[in-house]
Image (tube, grey):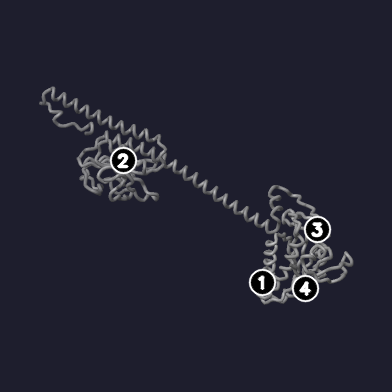
Amino acid sequence: MPPSQVPPDSLDPDAPPLVAEKRALEQRIRELEAKARSLDVINHLAASLLQPQIDVDDILWDVAQGAVAHLGLEDCVIYLFDEQREHLVQRAAFGPKNPREREILSPIRIKPGVGIVGTVARTGIAELIPDTREDPRYLQDDQARLSELTIPIFFGNQVIGVLDSEHSQQGFFTEEHLHILTTVASMTAARVTRALLDQQLLDANRLLESRIAERTRELSEATRRSDQLLLNILPHPIVERLKRGDHAIAERFDDVTVLFADLVDFTRWSTLRPPEHVVEILGQVFTEFDALTERYGLEKIKTIGDAYMVVAGVPAPRPDHRELMALMALQMVEAIRRLNQVLGTSLDVRIGMHSGPVIAGIIGTRKFAYDLWGDAVNMASRLESHGAAGRIHVAEATWRALHDRFSFEPRGEIEVKSIGRVKTWFLTGRTG
């Protein structure tokens, strides 16, 4: 029984002095016990402030079932505003509305200004109603009760919720109840405020981590695309050296094989067709050549118009560079024949290949290019331009190196610009 409520007979002036003294003493004991319970509740809440709880519902249920329940009240409901602050929503309860753990029967939503709870939420002023029958604002939910005590819960200067308790006894709530529940509401606000701030910090950290992860993925994807673009124009080892910070990249290779391929009369052919068709056909041709380059582990250097340049033995030297390039050249001729059948075209390719020393390196600072220089490059280019449609033109050195594994057709001596008379052959196939 609350400390301010004294049984009528305890104040009976006609009661014997000892009986009156005993009853007064019992009343004092009840008051002290009530104060002790109140202190226990306050101490419990004070201790819980030190707990790292960030779940608001955990806090509210702890207050309703672990604190308010020990005050000897019949009923308690804790409301919080929804995110839009359009309704107060029941979030935790103790008493008839909470028959099982963390369950509210028929939770209701109350608009600010509606009923006693809504009024306190709007004004921020606690209300003690001794007789709800005389207050038209009283809203009955599960059953009618005769007295009500409603306390606002603040976050800063803003009401964020309401602690509401009802009792079946008229005039049950006292000023001491008001004081205790105001303290409970204040400490609840402190716990909720801390939880909200911790949750905001946690959400901010998660958002930051998410943005960092997203940015990292974007940077990784951008790096991947950048690397892929570089790999489309530069050999992989050269790309790795550029990423390590190398800038002046130039090397001498003593023995490599260079090949030039050119589509015969492609310029004239292209003037008779729409640009889109020309680009599509050329794209399919070079896609076939690129696949062969990949298949034989060679290095595409560049395309110039309808000309295609590839090297074997650069940037990684290999002893079988001549044989691999010969196989590549034969497959290039076969690829053109196959494309003509599929596309209904009549394209021809002219190929020249030659072996020898070259210098390879990077030129340019904004638009990188990996290129080759040397007599082997010049001779391969001359053999291509002095060759014949559908044929693979080589010099005597290539014939001597490969004639035991490949078949050749002698062409005889020809005059090569800037070089003079040169004995050449046409590579026609592979033997064995």
Which residue type does callout 4 highlight?
Answer: Ala
- Disc 4 target residue: 389
- Disc 2 target residue: 64
Q: In 3D space, how far apart are the residues under numbered discs 4 and 2 (Cα atoms)?
A: 94 Å
Task: Point out the frontmost of discs 4 and 2.
Answer: 4
> What secondary structure is marked by label 4?
loop
Q: Which mark is residue 276?
A: 1
Q: In 3D space, how far apart are the residues under numbered discs 2 and 3 (Cα atoms)?
A: 86 Å
Q: Quadrant of residue 426?
A: bottom right
Residue found 37% across the figure and 49% down from its top: 82
Task: Point out the frontmost of discs 2 and 3.
Answer: 3
Classed neighbour count for the residue bearing mark 2: other residues with Cα under 10 Å, few (<14), some (14–19), many (≥20): many
> What secondary structure is marked by label 1?
helix
Q: Quadrant of residue 345?
A: bottom right
- Residue 373: x and y in percent read 80, 58
Q: Which sits earlier in the primary sequence, circle 2 or circle 1? A: 2
Q: Nearer the viewer, residue 103 or 200?
A: 103
- Disc 3 target residue: 373
Q: Which sits earlier in the primary sequence, circle 3 or circle 4? A: 3
Residue found 69% across the figure and 51% down from its top: 240
Q: Quadrant of residue 2?
A: top left
Q: Quadrant of the N terminus?
A: top left
Classed neighbour count for the residue bearing mark 1: other residues with Cα under 10 Å, few (<14), some (14–19), many (≥20): few
Q: Which sits earlier in the primary sequence, circle 2 or circle 3? A: 2
Q: In 3D space, how far apart are the residues under numbered discs 1 and 3 (Cα atoms)?
A: 34 Å
Residue found 38% across the figure and 43% down from its top: 56
Q: Which sits earlier in the primary sequence, circle 1 or circle 3? A: 1
- Residue 285: x and y in percent read 69, 69
Please say if the residues under marks 4 and 1 sit with CB atoms less than 8 Å apart: no
Q: Which sits earlier in the primary sequence, circle 4 or circle 2? A: 2
